[in-house]
Amino acid sequence: MAAEVFWADMRTEKGKNLVDKVATLWRKAGFQKAIAPEDLVAIKIHFGERGNLAYINPVFARQVVELVKTGRGKPFLTDSNTLYVGSRSNAVDHLQTAIENGFAYAVAGAPLIIADGLKGKDYFEVPVNGKHFQQVKISSAIYHADSLVVMSHFKGHELTSFGGTIKNLGMGCGSPSGKQMMHSDVLPEVREEKCIGCGKCRRWCPAGAITVNGKASINAELCIGCGECTVTCPVRAIKASFKSDPVVLQEKIVEFARGALKDKENKCVFFNFVTHVAPECDCNSWNDAAIIPDVGILASWDPVALDQASFDLANAQPALPGTRLDGHEGGKDKFLALSGYDGTPLLKYAEEMGLGTREYNLVKI
């Protein structure tokens, strides 16, 4: 059976601004049924890396917080620490970055809790019985929450083609060691014929795995597969290399997503913000120009249908001039063109794992 996906476009008028549209989506989708009085409600959102401006505006988070409170739920905003060394790799830096990016209590109206604790060691091993993992490491605040509201920024991604709800659930709810489990098949390689020896990859490498002696060289024993060098190289001399089939990373993310949803049937709801669709992940300390016009905000009880609808709507948009999609042919997969990877295996495997269906009915509000 097809799932319902509700869509609010970017058009506004007096008495119906974008923040109001979030509330309308909530009511139309019947999300209040996921919240019982006294529920501890995790609002999973990406707080944005320092220097990146493409993350979801905190004003939207505040609207969701208020909606949860109307059902007498107890909301908190949360995310897990990162595997790479940036401005969110421990709870102290993470909270500081979140506040600097506008998620302070005075704005968002709810406490901030880093889901996996001070150094990413607070997690539970959740059984999933998947193709790759029997159990996955899910951040404790996500695991213990009674209800889950997932607010995801839909955008491109340098390793998974695109990122939306399923990636926010899988990679975003995993502890740093869980993130390493997902990334363990991914190691970058230097194409020496293209390398200009500029050293930018070495300066951005969080693991100290790169040396430059005329050409860059990566120590596979030290490399953590974070992809920083891949997105930093100005001449694209470094590409991600998979030890196994490229779909393995996507499938591992799906298995972690299943773990994040475990034992929360009818208690999880999802938003995708298909706005400022940047070509790369919000984990970078910058964001490139949006590749397509803003599509709007989508909501569903079904994370698979939501990501499929977002993917389809994004690919139906024209490519914006002066962006990374210059010269891209219309009607083709924009995210494949950007990253070189097909992101649809994630959707296929998520459906196989029972996270939802790729069939959807789009309901425009």
Image (cartoon, grey):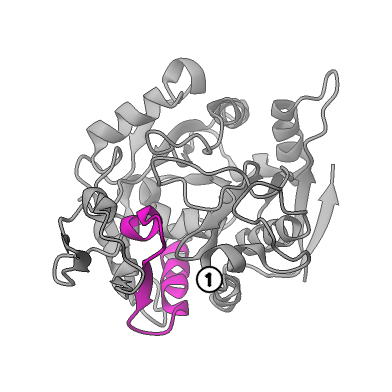
* Above or below: residue 243 compared with residue 119: below
Per the image, the residue denoted by label 1 is: 340
Between 186 and 99, the one nearer to me in the picture = 186
Q: Is residue 149 something one can see in this rendering?
A: yes
x and y percentages locating residue 107 in the rendered image? 50, 18
Closest to the observer, 287 or 13: 287
Residue in view at x 69 percent, y 60 percent: 327
Residue at 85%, 47% in the rendered image: 364
Quadrant occupied by the N terminus: bottom right
Query: Would you say residue 75 sits in the magenta stretch?
Result: no
Task: Classify the position of the C terminus by image quarter.
Answer: top right
Residue 156 is left or right of residue 243, and the answer is right
- Image location (x, y in percent) of residue 26: 70, 38
Q: Is residue 170 left or right of residue 8?
A: left
Let me know if residue 164 appears in the view.
no
Residue type pointed to by label 1: Gly
Q: In this view, does 208 lie above or below 331?
A: above
